[in-house]
Image (cartoon, helix red, strand yellow):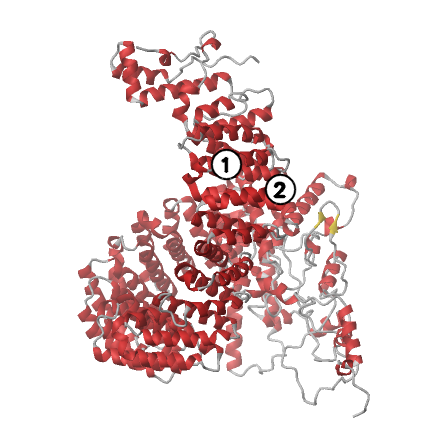
């Protein structure tokens, strides 16, 4: 050690490291939210199945109606669509056949397993050529229908076989990029350009798109968030000294598929075009290579964000152009783009006006230009929820305006919107439904059917699924009856089983979506799909059973007679089927049985039980779930007796389902618990609890939890009176055991303990000593969680302990908890305070141990704790003490608490604020209002608005609890302060006071008039607004109590304010005037209003008519005598005198 | 809707008012307004039995007759609407 003293900075971080960090901090291009940004993208979090939407193609749906009107042949549309769909099916069939053949060949050993070798290329090429030719023939349009022939999902080898896609060619074409040293795994980006007419970037015609279905869905390889780090970046990231680049060990092979980092994925091979500059720029920007993104766009203004991907869609408006050279159509296109960009990326006010504009001009723009821009945006991979929501909103608004002009675009819209129907987000589904329902109303049933018909037997299951859902929306929009004939035809289609399958699925979806609204058409719907039960396709039979299940579920508890026809096939079916089919049939039966009369239900239950019991042993998870569900439904029906359940179902049920394995899977667990609880409703508490109680001591914790949850629910439903003494001993014993043995502290055990003990009530007395000693022991546990749980348990048990007369134990618990108030973990501290509060509640303030006078001073510092749970628990406890036992605590202590409470008045949580305000009332009551009031009035001087508002509310509470006479003089006195905030606060407080005290205001009306005079003639708007609110409450409070003179005076002061324009002010003034109608009567008000109803200035008339209307609607009949006599205005045929009123006897 | 009131807390109020018969607006004509008043008056007479019988006694008619006539008069209590000048 040297003798010079060491300085503190000697202990700091090394200089070079500090420099590194400084440099790093200066660089700003680190995006900490990149991670979350990719999560917001819809495509990146959805499953592969959802992302199949990117594979879909859309066709023009020709407007048949229009064509017929014009007397011409329909071109495109239905015929074409059908041909296309047939073609696709054929294509898929051929590919399957090829695959099958290949597989066969491989198995026979004809082809070596080396996958690098191309499969029979010649053959494949032939097929591809044939298909292409056929397609050209079929479409006979210039634009391509399909994205590309090569469908990687189906046959990844096929594309390679065409030659120009060989890896080598690609590599040569792509510009070489320096390899990253870190992973040394060059990315190999396969660039199959996909073509499409409308679901691609609109900027350029026939523009090759980067292939998007690569590896993970939605992962743009070139995105800076996804790509590998370059050398430069790594250099920037890591300290310069102390790191070396290590060569990979020999024989190291990267486990991930090698990918190459290329700046652009588009190649010049095979006659493809080079990308347009704008597109390339967007790509480069996405890769983080150029960071300039526009924030200001000519003609649009500033946006809240602009994504690199937006560049390709909005390229046309990004640069300045000479508008005089553009044609009308081009101008229109740019206009639409600008509006869309404003809506999608703009700030809320910008968005709002743009949305209104695009709606207003929708017909002017026309359906074509609009949808050509909107729909590609919706198919963008990097679309986020908010953007999708906004674009969908645009479609919705535009649809209303366009009405039948949308017909040609129905299919395109459907392709984009249908995926929303299977989105996991509920609101997305609702939006999707809304759009499709509006679409079907605009386009009409016939057009919808002809558009969606080709998709019904589409080769892709995804398309069929979404189409079925869309159809069900159409059915609910246009009514089931109108769709029924079509459904009948589809469900009986002879051509393809897919059509039948989809038809039945439509019925199922209709049932799920419309619920009991299907009842009028139930028989028709059932008959529609009934034939499917004996279909020769297994999938159709299964779907039919599922459809019947959905129908029965929707119809419950009515409509059993409609199912008459299907009962027999269903029952035969459960004997014939195995596996998935059987599961569906069982499900249908499970839903139909609850509709039956008791005797039938009992009969059929017995029939089905045999099968169910056989299937108890199944290993299929789906089947297990369905079996459990059916058991639950059967057990719930009236006809099934307790005897039957006990004898025939329970033994096997417990044997197969109450095993440890079931507790491991969350969904099984839930289903078993639900079913057992349902069985308990019939079989009784002791039967079920007796069977499972021993398992509370099982060694597997999840299983114990499952048992506990079941017991909790059963006892919560049915009580504990059925439990005999021996069972009671076992039960309590088991519960204590499992509570002590738990390793993961969660709600289940706690709830179970609380429920069981509360249900047993006084019977739990013998065990209390043991339970309390457990709690005491756990209160001193090392783990904060355990302590917290012990405190929570105390909260739940306090009432029962009191019932059992064990005051000793309570006081012991109270003392221990009191000692624990120094707890450092806020969650635990909150629970401890809550437990103390619960004990104080049941024992009362006088008996409380520790005595209240000790407890409260201990709470005062805790109030300063910032944790919400602690705050809420302590404020509740303090409020309770202030309410019940304020006299045990010295006034000085209460004042101290008052000061602390002021801070709580601005808590974020409303519950805390309310509790604090209430506590003020209690404290004021016990202390006398003077001191509290002075605290509160002083508080009006603080800057913070929130705490001023809370103080005003607290003043009103004090006024309510201690009488207005204690507060109003003080408030009036305070109002004389020159400070604006204080005066506003006083007015606000007065407003709350009069609101709370109601009719009592009559005594104080005259004393506040002068103050109100002052406030209502103040220059400050807010003053007049608040004063108007006071007048409102005052006037309503004193109605009918003889204060008309002062009220009339106030009315004269309020009335001139009726021309105010600020929203809140005018609102308050109008309400005050309305209140005056109640107090002064409509006649007086009428005399004011008559002055301006026919005033030459429209602005005056509008306001006066508004007041007139409110008065008229409030007191129409009472106005009759106050209307003026217009007799002298009569002229010609018009007589305006009201003679009947002039009659007298 | 008047422009300054469009953004008030009671945005809907004007529309709600307009849904009821008898309410008015800045462009209501004299004839329309008075017609509404007359109808209100007649309805009030029919709706208050004491008033109906008072009128019946004063007129020397039966109560039913008075009620009927009042109801009849509601159709065009002030005569046909005057022709608009332009």
Residue in the picture at 51% in, 18% down: B29
Quadrant of image for the C terminus of chain A: top left
Query: Of discs 2 and 1, which sits in the foreground?
Result: 1
* Image-based side of A1128 in relation to A1102, left or right: left
Tell how many labels. 2
**How many neighbours does mark 2 have within 10 angstroms: few (below 14), some (14-19), or many (20 or more)?**
many
Tell me if I can see residue A70 in this picture: no
Q: Is residue A693 above or below residue A89?
A: below
Residue A478, by quadrant, is top left
What residue would you read off at disc 1?
A1007
> Whole-percent x and y of residue A1039?
42, 33
* Left or right placement of residue A643 versus residue A487 in this view: left
Residue A497 visible to the viewer:
yes
- The residue lying toward the viewer, choosing from A204 and A514, is A514
Q: Which residue is mark 2?
A: A358
The image quarter in which residue A672 lies: bottom left
Above or below residue A368? Residue A905 is: below
A483 or B73: nearer the eye? B73
Asked if the residue under mark 1 is in contact with the one under mark 2, i.e. CB atoms within 8 Å, the reply is no
- For marks 2 and 1, the one nearer the N-term is 2
Protein chain holding label 2:
A
Disc 1: CA contacts within 10 A as few (<14), some (14-19) or many (>=20): some
């Amino acid at each position: 050690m040297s003798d010079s003293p060491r300085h503190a900075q000697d202990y700091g971080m090394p200089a070079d490291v500090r420099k590194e960090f400084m440099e790093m901090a200066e660089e700003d291009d680190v995006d900490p939210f990149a991670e979350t940004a990719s999560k917001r993208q819809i495509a990146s979090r959805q499953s592969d199945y959802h992302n199949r939407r990117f594979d879909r193609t859309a066709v023009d749906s020709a407007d048949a109606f229009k064509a017929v009107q014009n007397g011409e042949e329909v071109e495109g549309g239905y015929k074409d669509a059908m041909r296309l769909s047939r073609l696709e099916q054929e294509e898929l069939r051929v590919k399957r056949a090829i695959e099958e053949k290949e597989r066969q060949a491989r198995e026979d050993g004809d082809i070596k397993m080396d996958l690098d070798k191309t499969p029979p290329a010649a053959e494949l090429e032939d097929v591809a050529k044939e298909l292409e030719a056929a397609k050209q023939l079929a479409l006979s349009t210039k634009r391509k229908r399909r994205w590309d022939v090569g469908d990687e999902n189906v046959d990844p080898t096929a594309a390679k076989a065409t030659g120009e896609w060989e890896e080598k060619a690609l590599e040569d074409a792509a510009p070489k990029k320096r390899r990253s040293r870190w992973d040394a795994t060059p990315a190999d980006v396969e660039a199959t350009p996909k073509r499409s007419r409308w679901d691609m970037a609109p900027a350029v015609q026939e523009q090759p798109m980067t292939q998007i279905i690569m590896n993970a869905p939605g992962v743009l390889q070139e995105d800076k968030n996804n790509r590998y780090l370059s050398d430069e970046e790594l250099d920037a990231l890591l300290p310069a000294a102390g790191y070396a680049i290590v060569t990979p060990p020999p024989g190291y092979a990267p486990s991930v598929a090698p990918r190459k980092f290329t700046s652009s994925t588009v190649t010049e091979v095979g006659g493809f075009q080079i990308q347009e500059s704008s597109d390339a720029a967007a790509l480069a920007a996405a890769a983080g290579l150029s960071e300039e993104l526009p924030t200001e766009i000519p003609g649009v203004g500033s946006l809240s964000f602009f994504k690199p991907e937006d560049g390709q869609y909005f390229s046309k408006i990004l640069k300045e152009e000479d508008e005089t050279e553009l044609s009308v159509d081009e101008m229109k296109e740019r206009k639409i783009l600008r509006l869309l960009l404003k809506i999608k990326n703009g700030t809320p006010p910008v968005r709002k006006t743009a949305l209104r504009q695009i709606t207003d001009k929708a017909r002017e723009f026309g359906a074509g230009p609009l949808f050509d821009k909107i729909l590609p945006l919706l198919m963008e991979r990097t679309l986020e929820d908010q953007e999708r929501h906004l674009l969908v909103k645009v479609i919705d608004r535009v649809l209303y305006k366009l009405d039948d002009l949308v017909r040609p675009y129905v299919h395109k819209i459907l392709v984009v919107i249908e995926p929303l129907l299977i989105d996991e987000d509920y609101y997305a589904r609702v939006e999707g439904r809304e759009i499709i329902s509006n679409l079907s109303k605009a386009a009409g049933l016939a057009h919808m059917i002809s558009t969606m018909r080709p998709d019904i037997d589409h080769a892709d299951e995804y398309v069929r699924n979404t189409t079925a859902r869309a159809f069900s929306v159409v059915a609910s929009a246009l009514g089931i009856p109108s769709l029924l004939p079509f459904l009948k035809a589809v469900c009986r289609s002879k051509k393809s089983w897919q059509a039948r399958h989809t038809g039945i699925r439509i019925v199922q979806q209709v049932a799920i979506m419309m619920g009991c609204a299907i009842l009028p058409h139930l028989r028709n719907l059932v008959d529609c799909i009934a034939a499917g039960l004996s279909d020769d396709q297994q999938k159709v039979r299964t779907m039919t059973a599922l459809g019947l299940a959905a129908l029965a579920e929707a119809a419950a508890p009515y409509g059993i007679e409609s199912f008459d026809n299907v009962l027999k096939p269903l029952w035969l079916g459960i004997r014939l089927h195995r596996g998935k089919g059987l599961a569906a049939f069982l499900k249908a039966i499970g839903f139909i049985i609850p509709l039956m009369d008791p005797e039938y239900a009992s009969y059929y239950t017995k029939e089905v039980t045999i099968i169910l019991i056989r299937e108890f042993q199944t290993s299929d998870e789906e089947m297990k779930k369905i079996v459990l569900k059916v058991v639950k439904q059967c057990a719930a029906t009236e006809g099934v007796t307790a005897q039957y359940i006990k004898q025939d179902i329970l033994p096997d049920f417990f044997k197969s389902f109450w095993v440890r394995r079931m507790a491991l899977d969350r969904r099984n667990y839930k289903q078993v618990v639900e079913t057992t609880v349902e069985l308990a409703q019939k079989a009784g508490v002791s039967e079920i609890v007796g069977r499972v109680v021993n398992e509370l001591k099982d060694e597997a914790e999840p299983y114990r939890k499952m048992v506990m949850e079941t017991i909790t629910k059963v006892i919560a439903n049915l009580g504990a009176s059925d439990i005999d003494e021996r069972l009671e001993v076992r039960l309590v014993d088991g519960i204590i055991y499992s509570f002590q043995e738990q390793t993961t502290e969660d709600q289940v055990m706690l709830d179970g303990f609380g429920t069981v003990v509360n249900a047993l009530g006084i019977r739990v007395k013998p065990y209390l000593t043991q339970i309390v000693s457990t709690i005491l022991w756990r209160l001193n546990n090392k783990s904060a969680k355990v302590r917290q749980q012990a405190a929570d348990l105390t909260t739940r048990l306090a009432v029962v302990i009191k019932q059992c007369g064990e005051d000793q134990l309570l006081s012991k618990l109270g003392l221990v908890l009191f000692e624990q108030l120094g707890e450092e973990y806020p969650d635990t501290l909150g629970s401890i305070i809550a437990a103390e509060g619960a004990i104080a509640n049941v024992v009362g303030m006088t008996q409380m141990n520790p005595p209240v006078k000790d407890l409260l001073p201990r709470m005062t510092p805790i109030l300063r704790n910032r944790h919400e749970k602690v705050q809420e628990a302590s404020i509740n406890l303090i409020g309770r003490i202030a309410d019940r036992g304020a006299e045990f605590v010295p006034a000085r202590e209460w004042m101290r608490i008052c000061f602390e409470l002021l801070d709580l008045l601005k808590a974020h949580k409303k519950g805390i604020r309310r509790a604090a305000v209430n506590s003020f009332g209690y404290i004021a009551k016990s202390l006398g209002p003077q001191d509290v009031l002075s605290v509160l009035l002083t508080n009006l001087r603080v800057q913070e608005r929130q705490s001023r508002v809370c103080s005003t509310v607290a003043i009103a509470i004090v006024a309510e609890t201690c009488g207005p006479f204690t507060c109003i003089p003080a408030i009036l006195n305070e109002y004389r302060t020159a400070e604006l905030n204080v005066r506003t606060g006083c007015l606000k407080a007065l407003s709350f006071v009069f609101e709370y005290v109601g009719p009592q205001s009559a005594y104080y009306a005259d004393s506040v008039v002068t103050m109100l005079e002052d406030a209502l003639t103040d220059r400050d708007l807010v003053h007049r607004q608040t004063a108007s609110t006071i007048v409102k409450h005052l006037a309503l409070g004193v109605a009918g109590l003889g204060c008309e003179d002062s009220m009339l005076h106030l009315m004269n002061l309020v009335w001139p304010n009726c021309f105010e324009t600020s929203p809140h002010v005018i609102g308050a003034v109008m309400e005050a005037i309305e209140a005056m109608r109640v107090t002064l009567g409509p006649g007086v008000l009428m005399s004011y209003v008559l002055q301006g109803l026919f005033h030459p200035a429209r602005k005056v008339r509008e306001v006066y008519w508004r007041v007139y209307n409110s008065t008229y609607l409030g007191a129409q009949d009472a106005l009759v005598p106050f209307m003026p006599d217009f007799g002298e205005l009569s002229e010609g045929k018009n007589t305006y005198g009201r003679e009947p009123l002039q009659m007298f006897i | 809707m008047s422009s300054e009131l469009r953004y008030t807390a009671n945005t809907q109020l004007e529309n709600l008012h307009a849904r009821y018969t008898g309410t008015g607006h800045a462009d209501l004509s004299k004839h329309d307004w008075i017609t509404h008043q007359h109808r209100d008056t007649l309805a009030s007479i029919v709706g208050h039995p004491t008033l109906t019988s008072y009128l019946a006694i004063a007129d020397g008619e039966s109560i039913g007759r008075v009620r009927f006539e009042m109801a009849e008069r509601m159709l065009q209590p002030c005569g046909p609407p005057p022709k608009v000048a332009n």
